[in-house]
Image (cartoon, rainbow, N blue to C red):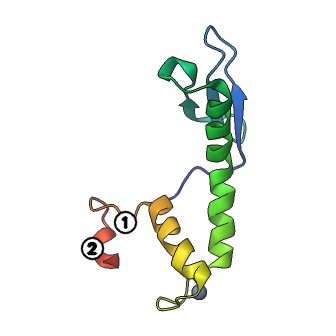
Amino acid sequence: MKHTKGKWTCTKISSMDDRDFEIHATGIIFIAVVKGEIVGIPQVEAEANAKLIVAAPEMLEALKEIVHLDDNICCCTACKIGKPIIKKAEGINHPNHENYKRSN
Ligand SMILES: [Zn+2]
């Protein structure tokens, strides 16, 4: 599973409900809306959620640099913590994913 490439950014929506945040890739490709107070999440928390989502692609790439992806039996701390997160981010731990049976 591959996510949308490019730098992800978040901007406060400038409309009637300006407490939500939009996530874009490369400034133009719409990814998502992060809801805030309308769903009971304080605006500062919604903004923190949006910033976390925006950082996710870079964190995933950084994690892939740290773990030993070519070593299936390595049990160093980076691999123990990082490999399950990479699998979660790329969707191959989900029972409905086509790669699930191959990796388990
Ligand atoms: Zn390792």
Question: Does residue 27 appear in the picture of this structure?
Answer: yes
The local crowd at label 1, few if under 14, some if 14 to 19, many if 20 or more residues have their Cα within 10 Å, is: some
- Work out whether residue 34 or residue 37 is closer to the camera in this orientation and state it: 37
Residue 13: assigned label: none
Determine which residue is flagged by label 1.
Answer: 93
Question: Does residue 1 appear in the picture of this structure?
Answer: no
- Residue positioned 71% across, 42% down in the render: 26
Q: Secondary structure at mark 2?
A: helix
In the image, taking residue 40 as reference, residue 45 lies left or right, namely: right
- Work out whether residue 81 or residue 66 is closer to the camera in this orientation and state it: 81
Determine which residue is flagged by label 2.
Answer: 101
- Residue positioned 39% across, 66% down in the render: 92
Tag nearer the camera, 2 or 1: 1
Residue 41's quadrant in the figure?
top right
Q: Position of residue 69 (x, y in %)?
A: 56, 82
- Residue positioned 52% across, 67% down in the render: 86
- Residue positioned 55% across, 87% down in the render: 70
Q: Secondary structure at mark 1?
A: loop
| 21, above or below 80, in the image | above
Taking the image in four quarters, ligand 1 sits in the one at bottom right
Mark 2 or mark 1: whose residue is earlier in sequence: 1
Q: Position of residue 89 (x, y in %)?
A: 50, 59
> Where, quadrant-wise, is the C terminus in this rendering?
bottom left
| Amino acid type at image mark 1 | Asn
| 24, above or below 91, in the image | above
Residue 77's quadrant in the figure?
bottom right
Q: Position of residue 83 (x, y in %)?
A: 51, 74
| Amino acid type at image mark 2 | Lys
Asked if labels 1 and 2 touch by Cβ distance under 8 angstroms, the answer is no
